[in-house]
Image (cartoon, helix red, strand yellow):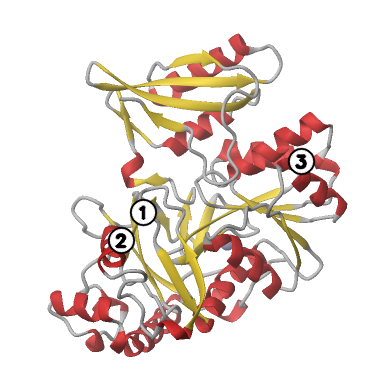
């Protein structure tokens, strides 16, 4: 049976779904009369925010970029001019992980926080999580918003939550087993790392009660080989989802497990553009996702360029939701592409290829510049003493998939870094 968070809204016919979005857009722009950032931005674009009545009208507003937000907070410390209300109305402070530069601070009002929680509730309900579940959040619980909203969303669907903050991997595994967690929430990288530690400790995760893994923070849970590796190790179904501090939790996987995940069109308006020309891109081709969140008036983003590359499909999903889907989740980031001997490759595709060789337990990709071209040196740790076999399989996979030759190097077991949050396995050497 398919589980929904809000069946009525999730199965709305397209026309009504679009009307619902338009209503939300009108309500949002009416609230933004005191939002200096967007008042100024719309004036600079030659339009009046109050004139926006629909998703079509919204397209007249210039895009918002991350750099603009960073500059705004730098020039107007500490919180910038994106706040719609006086600071006293905000209760929740978070900041971005800052993997691509200076962290952005983000404030939420009680209403905006509630909205974030609902967005996560869609994620949980679509994965069949209910009040019968015990959710384990394998996070550090630092200032990154998804750690806290993940737990708030789980409470919202009635589940019991256990925090993995302040624990090492072994302590987390013991907590999962002892407290009979049925759902684990973490990055795909960390799910694989926990599985590796479990196997070293002789813990059989497949016989644990964990039946659902909810994974985000990086591409992976929609990549067939990564998904298979996680599901095999945990004996659980792996659900992908996507979100960002600036935007919210904007996509989720459903029980139909189609390899394409749903965009939450009840809470967001989406566009896909060519990152170079900024022209709209239709179904079936990858493009950059642009997001307007419809329920976070306190500190909203309108036409925000996420940098995430997605490929939309409007094919109906067997789960019955009318929300559009994106094939393979987030396939990469526009600025992450590597060009090896004329072939464009995203790190997620390499990750999937390497996870297709089950004896490789960890890896690191060094991108070297050789005679003006990118060249890949891949260091691998292999389970058992089967380096030659694994290296041969990987060489073959790269030749088959991308028609390129890569260098493969042996790494001692345990010598490569492990990651609890977003992995940094791709290193560009100068
Ligand atoms: Zn579905």
Q: Is residue 340 above or below residue 256?
A: above
Residue 307: horizontal and vertical position, in percent? 34, 53
Give the position of the N terminus as an image quadrant. bottom right
Instruction: Look at the numbered disc 3 and give the secondary structure of its residue.
Output: helix
Q: CA distance from mark 1 to mark 2?
A: 7 Å
Q: Which mark is residue 170?
A: 3
Which element is circle 1 on?
Answer: loop
Q: Earlier in the sequence, mark 1 or mark 2?
A: 2
CB contact under 8 Å: marks 1 and 3? no
Give the mark, 3 or 2, whose residue is nearer the N terminus: 2
Residue name at image x 54 percent, y 43 percent: 220
As displayed, is residue 158 above or below residue 400? below
Task: Estimate the x, y position of residue 207 in percent, counting from the top left.
Answer: 86, 43
**N-terminal label among 1 and 3:** 1
Judging by the rendered image, the residue that carries numbered circle 2 is 70
Label 1: how many Cα within 10 Å (few below 14, some 14–19, many 20+) = some
Left-right relation of 409 to 334: right
Instruction: Identify residue for label 1.
Output: 102
Give neighbour class at mark 3: few <14, some 14-19, many 20+ (Cα, 10 Å): some
Q: Residue furthest front?
A: 77
Residue 274's disc number? none
Quadrant of picture, ligand 1: bottom right
Q: Is residue 316 visible?
A: no
Dots 1 and 2: beta carbons under 8 Å? Answer: yes
């Amino acid at each position: 049976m398919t589980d929904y968070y809000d069946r009525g809204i999730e199965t709305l016919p397209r026309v009504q779904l679009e009307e619902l979005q338009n209503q939300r857009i009108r309500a949002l722009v009416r609230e933004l009369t005191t939002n200096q950032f967007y008042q100024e931005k719309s004036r600079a674009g030659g339009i009046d925010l109050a004139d926006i009545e629909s998703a079509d009208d919204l397209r007249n507003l210039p895009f918002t970029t991350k750099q603009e937000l960073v500059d705004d907070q730098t020039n107007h410390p500490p919180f910038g001019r994106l706040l719609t209300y006086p600071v006293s109305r905000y209760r929740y402070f978070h900041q971005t992980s800052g993997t691509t530069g200076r962290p952005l601070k983000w404030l939420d009002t009680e209403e905006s926080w509630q909205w974030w929680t609902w967005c996560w509730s869609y994620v949980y309900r679509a994965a069949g999580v209910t009040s019968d579940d015990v959710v384990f959040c394998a996070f550090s619980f630092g200032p990154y918003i998804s750690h806290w909203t993940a737990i708030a969303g789980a409470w919202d669907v009635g589940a019991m939550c256990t925090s993995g903050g302040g624990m090492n991997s072994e302590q987390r595994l013991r907590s999962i087993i002892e407290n009979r967690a049925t759902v684990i929430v973490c990055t795909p990288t960390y799910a694989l790392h926990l599985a590796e530690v479990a196997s070293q400790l002789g813990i059989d995760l497949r016989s644990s009660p964990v039946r659902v893994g909810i994974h985000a923070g990086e591409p992976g849970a929609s990549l067939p080989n990564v998904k298979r590796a996680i599901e095999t190790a945990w004996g659980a179904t792996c659900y992908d989802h996507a979100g960002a501090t600036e935007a919210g939790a904007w996509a989720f996987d459903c029980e139909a497990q189609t390899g394409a995940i749903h965009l939450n069109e009840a809470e967001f308006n989406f566009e896909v553009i060519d990152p170079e020309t900024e022209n709209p891109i239709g179904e079936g081709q990858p493009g950059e996702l642009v997001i307007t969140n419809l329920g976070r008036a306190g500190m909203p983003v309108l036409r925000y360029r996420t940098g995430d590359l997605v490929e939309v499909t409007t094919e109906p999903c067997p789960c019955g939701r009318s929300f559009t889907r994106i094939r393979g989740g987030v396939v990469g980031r526009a600025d992450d592409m590597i060009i090896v001997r004329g072939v464009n490759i995203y790190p997620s595709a390499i990750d999937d290829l390497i996870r297709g060789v089950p004896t490789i337990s960890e890896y690191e990709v060094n991108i070297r510049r050789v005679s003006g071209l990118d060249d890949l040196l891949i260091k691998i740790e292999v389970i058992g003493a089967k380096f030659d076999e694994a290296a041969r399989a990987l060489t073959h996979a790269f030749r088959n998939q991308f028609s390129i030759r890569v260098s493969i190097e042996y790494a001692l077991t345990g010598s490569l870094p492990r990651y609890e949050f977003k992995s940094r396995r791709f290193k560009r050497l100068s």
